[in-house]
Image (tube, rainbow, N blue to C red):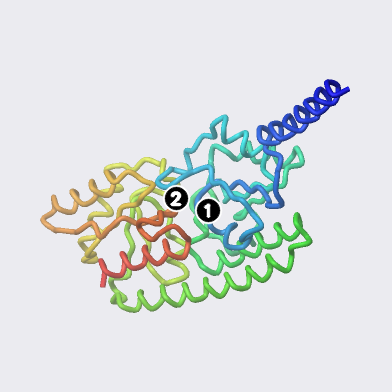
Amino acid sequence: MYRNFKKLAFLWMFFFYGIIVAASETGVKTDDKLNIVTTTTIFKDLVESIGGEKVKVTSLMGEGINVHSYTASAGDLNRLDNADIIIYGGLHLEGRMGAIFDDLENSGKNVLSLGDNLDKSLLLYRKENHPDPHTWFDTQLWILQSKLVADKLSEIDEKNKDYYMNRYESYKEEIEELRAYVKSRIEEIPEESRVLITAHGAYSYFGRQFKFEIRSVRGINANSESGTKDIIDLADFIIERNIKAIFVETSVSHRVVEALQEAVSSKGVKVKIGGELYSESLGDKERDTETYIKTFKRNIDIIAEALK
């Protein structure tokens, strides 16, 4: 009898162990937190700001990754398949992953495209009527996207709706404070010097909101090629407008901006590289840039110090 009891106990232990292993391998939750996957660290920070302790968020792409050309790995596909909610930028930001998100949504997965759910009249468009996906550089659009996240979390986890909405209201106030800070730093720059020149066109929404003229060597897609004529024309513009500084980006090769600097120098004029800006990802705690708000402040501090 004792031997049978030991055998039965062993079988039950083996059964429960199998459940735990299966859960860990398939991504089934073993706690009450929503398992959320985002594409970039910018969206990861947004979801954590609204979701707080109720969410566990994973970003597929780290700092310095070119989001436009990113190709999902087998591990990424597994993370997406096991997520409770998938949140991405949309508007063709994640160029090569669009079909994956469509397939997941069609299969019944909870998928939220932040950009595609904005009012189209609020978007900026480039040639061929392609929308500019870098909407996070307009703080008012970021507030709208924050509300989209709060609504989605509330829909999936209705019992914690008040929690998400309260955090949204608090975050909204923080973004309004950020807007005021950015505006105050821009006021230090003479109006004629409020020109931002970068490698690719990620800052048009920033320019529209804060009345900055934006120029770039490349278009809104960091993969697009820049020709010699583009660089020469922009070099002439820099000389004509007496621009003090141009800027490199963390997610784009510095070579294109360095080539622009050399083109200006070849005409007997000096222009400095004012610093490195974040465009499509956040930084880290070591540089105090691990959140959207800190990264935005770091960008505007670099811009203001170089151009004022």
Q: Position of residue 149 (x, y in %)?
A: 65, 59
Q: Give, as a three-letter code, the residue at label 1.
A: Pro
Compared with residue 291, is residue 168 higher up or lower down, i.e. above or below? below
Which residue is depicted at the point 52% across and 73% down? 174
Which quarter of the rendering shows the C terminus? bottom left
How packed is label 2: few (under 14 Cα within 10 Å), some, or many (20 or more)?
A: many
Compared with residue 221, is residue 147 higher up or lower down, i.e. above or below? below
Q: Residue furthest left?
A: 268
**Left or right: 190 as drawn, with respect to 208:** left
Compared with residue 209, is residue 117 higher up or lower down, i.e. above or below? above
Q: Residue furthest front?
A: 2
**Left or right: 255 as drawn, with respect to 169:** left
Which residue is nearer to you in this view: 187 or 84?
84
Q: Which residue is mark 1?
A: 133
Dot 2 lies on which element? loop
Q: Which residue is mark 2?
A: 220
Which residue is nearer to you in this view: 308 or 220?
308
Hey, which quadrant is residue 17 in on the image? top right
Hey, which quadrant is residue 28 in on the image? top right
Mark 2 vs mark 1: which is more N-terminal?
1
Which residue is nearer to you in this view: 195 or 89?
89
Dot 1 lies on which element? loop
Q: Give, as a three-letter code, the residue at label 2.
A: Ile
